[in-house]
Amino acid sequence: MASGTGSNARKIVEYFSKHEHINVSLLASNKKQAGVLGICEEYEIDKFVFNKSYFYGSEDFVNVLKSQNIDFVILAGFLWMIPKYLIEAYKDRILNIHPSLLPKHGGKGMYGHYVHEAVKAAGETETGITIHLVNEEYDRGRAIFQRKVQLEVSDDPETIASKVLELEHEFFPRVIEDYIYRF
Ligand code: GRF
């Protein structure tokens, strides 16, 4: 599930495109125009676009996932809170990536450049990524993987963002694979 540019979604799709056991069968987004949906055409992956009233007002999304035989849900830049019905249907099978070392710089409103601005403002000497299970509180599910990167005094939010994104691209697909195999 993604709503943004989808650079992580692209890495994930690429990584699993020729995988023996794991494949990406659906890309779901709350944004019709999301850059991420272009990936669907390129890789012949089904897409599903939905709005708020559908997502929160019914539980039909679970039926969509089940009808595609989906076992795991990956949030790659998907910002909406995941509703209870979905968390229950996919207990411990929804993963998210957050661009900081949680519990630092997480929670509602902490996404995209806000995270890296907060890291800079706090004078952190390191930041990183957290891959975690999704529960009903923003960024509070059990962390399954973290990786740090050192920061220089000269780093600004943009350079921090690019250091972090590099880590995301390197590790997210592999951590997903590992988690699925161990499940
Ligand atoms: C990433 O920084 C991720 O940590 C956060 O949203 C961003 C998505 O970036 N959850 P992209 O759309 O994958 O480029």
Image (cartoon, grey):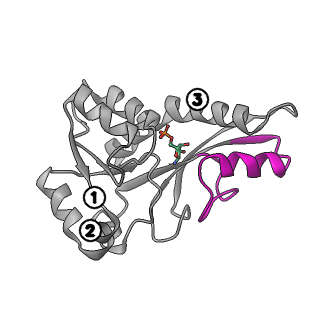
Q: Where is residue 112 drawn, in percent x and y?
A: 60, 47
Give the secondary structure at mark 2: helix
- Residue 110 lies in the magenta stretch: yes
Q: Which mark is residue 54?
A: 2
Residue under the point 31% across and 32% down: 39
**Element type where label 1 sits in the image:** loop
| Tag in front: 3 or 1 | 1
Determine whether label 3 and label 1 are within 8 Å by CB.
no
Q: CA gap, disc 2 to disc 3?
A: 34 Å
Q: In the displayed image of the protein, which residue is found farthest to the left? A: 67
33 or 100: nearer the eye? 33
Q: Characterize the local packing of mark 3: few (<14), some (14-19) or many (20 or more) Cα atoms within 10 angstroms.
A: few
Asked if residue 19 shows in the view, the reply is no
* Res 3 seen here: yes
Residue occupying image coordinates x 19% and y 67%: 60
Query: Which SS class for mark 3?
Result: helix
**Image check: 177 left or right of 102?**
left
The residue at which mark 3 appears reads as 166
Circle 1: residue type: Phe
Q: Give the overall secondary structure of the magenta segment.
A: loop
Question: Does mark 1 have its CB less than 8 Å from ligand 1?
Answer: no
Residue 85 vs residue 171, the one in the foreground: 85
Q: Residue at x 42, y 35 (%)?
A: 173
Q: Nearer the viewer, mark 2 or mark 3?
A: 2
The amino acid sitting under disc 2 is Tyr
Asked if residue 182 lies left or right of residue 125, the reply is: left
- The picture quadrant where one finds residue 82 is bottom left
Residue highlighted by disc 1? 50
Tell whether label 2 touches label 1 (CB within 8 Å): yes
Q: CA distance from mark 3 to mark 1?
A: 29 Å
Q: Which residues are magenta?
A: 99-127
Q: Where is residue 179 drawn, in percent x and y? A: 39, 45
